[in-house]
Image: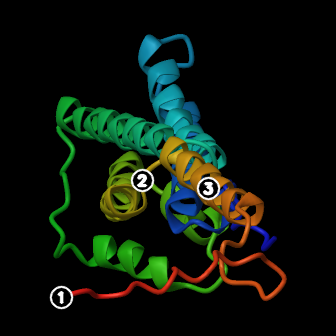
Amino acid sequence: MPTPPPIIPPHGGYRDLKSFQMAEIVYDGTVKFCDRFIDRRSRTHDQMVQAARSGRQNIAEGSQASGTSKKTELKLVGVARASLEELLLDYQDFLRQRELAAWPKEHPTAQDVRRLAYAANRSYSTYRPYLEDAPPETAANAMLCLIHQTNYLLDQQLRQLEQAFLQQGGFTERLYHARQQVRQVEHRADTPNKSYSPNRSNPPDPPDTEIRF
């Protein structure tokens, strides 16, 4: 009997996801930013760090769960996206409440930060000059650039997951189809061959009939 395809596909390689890599940089950057510029005793400090952590952790958890539940993966990646949107608003509030400038995309330093996304083997250290060695306005705007890039990757990831779910279905559907295939193979193996065999007794020829007028 041929071996059926695996029901649980490869999963869990979240460290290779660009979205996870960027979310980890956002998390590390937020921890440093909050320690520098937000009172550690304030609720805002904890909320920003937790939102950044949620973004990273839910990408990892969703990737790990994808083997048995695409629905769960979709949900968790969506939670990661929502957490980073919350964090984005916190950085915007930081700038607005301190009357600091929010940079447009055309700002030269913002463009410099964006271009670092193409750097080989980039990590938190790649962005350190814009986060740890910079004034609050530069650090906050650099974090906004990083969050926007991460959100873009998550939006792309969500669209791909939606298409994969529609085309391939979820774990329950794969389990059902795999079981049906096994049953069909087993049924064919158990069904006797009813084709003609020379050793089988054949019915006698019908008697001759005489036609009378």
Q: Residue at x 19, y 52 (%)?
A: 102
Task: Please say whether residue 152 is visible from this viewpoint.
Answer: no
Nearer the N terminus, badge 1 or badge 3? 3
Residue with the mark numbered 1? 213
At mark 2, the secondary structure is: loop
User: Which of label 1 and label 3 is nearer to you?
Assistant: 1
Choose top left, top right, bottom left or bottom right for residue 152: bottom left
Q: Is residue 12 above or below residue 97?
A: below
Comparing 186 with 31, the one in front is: 186
At label 2, the amino acid type is Gly
Give the spatial CA distance, label 2 vs label 1.
73 Å
Q: Which dot marks residue 138?
A: none
- Of the 4 image quadrants, the one containing the C terminus is bottom left
Task: Please say whether residue 42 is visible from this viewpoint.
Answer: yes
Residue with the mark numbered 2? 169
User: Which of label 2 and label 3 is nearer to you?
Assistant: 3
At mark 1, the secondary structure is: loop
User: Which of label 2 and label 1 is nearer to you?
Assistant: 1
